[in-house]
Amino acid sequence: MSVVLDTAEVPSADRAAYWHEAVSHTFIPLDVALLESAPAPATITSHRLGALQVSLVRAGPQRVERGAGLIARGGEDHLTLALQHRGTARLVQDGHRVELRPGTFAISDAGRPFAKELPEPFFFTAFHWPRSAVGVSEEDLRVLTATAFDTGDDTARLVAAYLGCLSRSVGSMEPRQASRLATTALDLLAVLAHERRGRSVPEAPEAALATLARVKDHILRHLGDPDLSPERIAAAHHVSVRYLHKLFRFEGMTVARWIQRQRLDVCRRDLARPAADRATVAAVAGRWGFVSASHFSRAFRAAYGVSPREWQACAGTGPTPGAVRLPLPAAVPGSGYGVAV
C-alpha cells in the first residue's frame, strides 16, 4: 500500500502549513520553511518495506531544520538517506557541509541537529529506517552521516544503483519480495559503513556459508522458542559459541540481533492479519519467543516507528491495497511520525 500526501488541492495560502505537517508526519518532527512566495504543488508518496520506509518527494525550494527541541519530541532513533534525482541540496550536520547533486546521496541522523537547504525545485527518494535495523555500531553510523556518496566510489555506486532501482519499482512489489529487498538494502548500507571505517565485512569461505545457512534455517524453525540462545544454537550444530558469533560477523551483526529482526518481521505480519484471524498483541509476541510484552513493544517501535497496537490498528482499519491520497491537512492522522505507510 502507498500513501500520497499532495498539496495540489490545498489553497496556496495553506500549502506551507500543510507541507510542514506532511513532512513531519512522514519522517520525524522537523521545521520546514518554504523559499518561494507562492508555493508550487508538492507530493510525498510513501511505501513501507519491512523496517524500511521509502518516500518519493517532489517539491519546490525549501529549508529543513531539526534542533534540540524537535529531537526531544521523538524520532531520534531514525536515519534518513536521501538519493537526489533532480535539483541540488546542501546538508549540514556535525560540522560537516556536503552538497548533493543528481545521482548522489547522503545520510542524516535524526538524533543530532542538522539543517538541509534545497534552493531549487527538487525530486529525491528518502529511505527512512530505525538505526537498530542495520547491524553496525554507533561509530560506523557516524562515518555515514553528513557525507556525500557519489559514483566515484565503487561501493557507493552499487548502493546508489540498488536504491534507485528499488525506488522505481517499489509500488509494484509483493509484500514478501519488498521486505527481502529492503533487508538487502540495509545490508548494503552496513557494508558501506564497514568499508568507510576501513574494515570491510570479511568474506566468508564456502564451508562457513554453508554452516551459516543451516544455522539460519534452524533459527527460523525455532523462532517461537523463548529459550533459543547462542549456546543452544551452537550445541545443535556441534560448533562453539565463539565460532557461531564468528559466522554472524559475515552478516555484519550479532546472533541476537539477527534473531530479533526475524521475530519482529513475523510478528509484524501476524499483527496485520485480517480481524477474523487476528490474535492479541501479547499472544503474537509470545508465539514468536518474546517473553516480555514491554520489551517486545520497545523493540517493535524501534524497528518500525509505531507501537504493535498502532500497527495492528492501522492494518485493521486501513483500505485495501492501493494508493491512499490525503489531500487536506485534516486527513493527516494524528501526530505520529513514520506511520504514513
Image (spheres, rainbow, N blue to C red):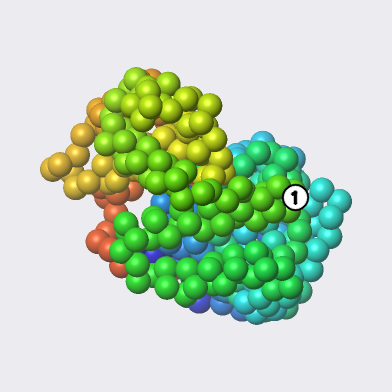
Quadrant (top left/top right/bottom left/bottom right) for the N terminus? bottom left
Give coordinates of residue 83: x percent, y percent: 62, 68
Q: Residue at x 34, y 20 (%)?
A: 227
Circle count: 1
Badge 1 density bin: few <14, some 14–19, many ≥20, Cα 10 Å: few
Location of residue 159 by image quarter: bottom right
Give coordinates of residue 328: x percent, y percent: 46, 64
Residue sitting nearer the eye, 32 or 125: 125
The image shows residue 56, relative to residue 302, as above or below, that is: below
Task: Look at mark 1 in the image and give the residue it sits on.
Answer: 198
Q: Residue at x 28, y 31 (%)?
A: 222
Location of residue 82 by image quarter: bottom right
Give coordinates of residue 191: x percent, y percent: 61, 53
Residue sitting nearer the eye, 177 or 89: 177
Image side of residue 93 versus residue 18, left or right: right
Give coordinates of residue 70: x percent, y percent: 68, 43
Callout 1: helix, strand or loop? Answer: loop
Residue sitting nearer the eye, 227 or 314: 227
Can the viewer see residue 115?
Answer: no
Q: Residue at x 74, y 73 (%)?
A: 152
The image shows residue 258, relative to residue 12, as above or below, that is: above
Quadrant (top left/top right/bottom left/bottom right) for the C terminus? bottom left
Determine the residue located farthest toward the left in the rendered image. Answer: 276
Can the viewer see residue 189?
Answer: yes
Amino acid identity at mark 1: Gly
Q: Residue at x 66, y 75 (%)?
A: 103
Determine the residue located farthest toward the right in the rendered image. Answer: 95
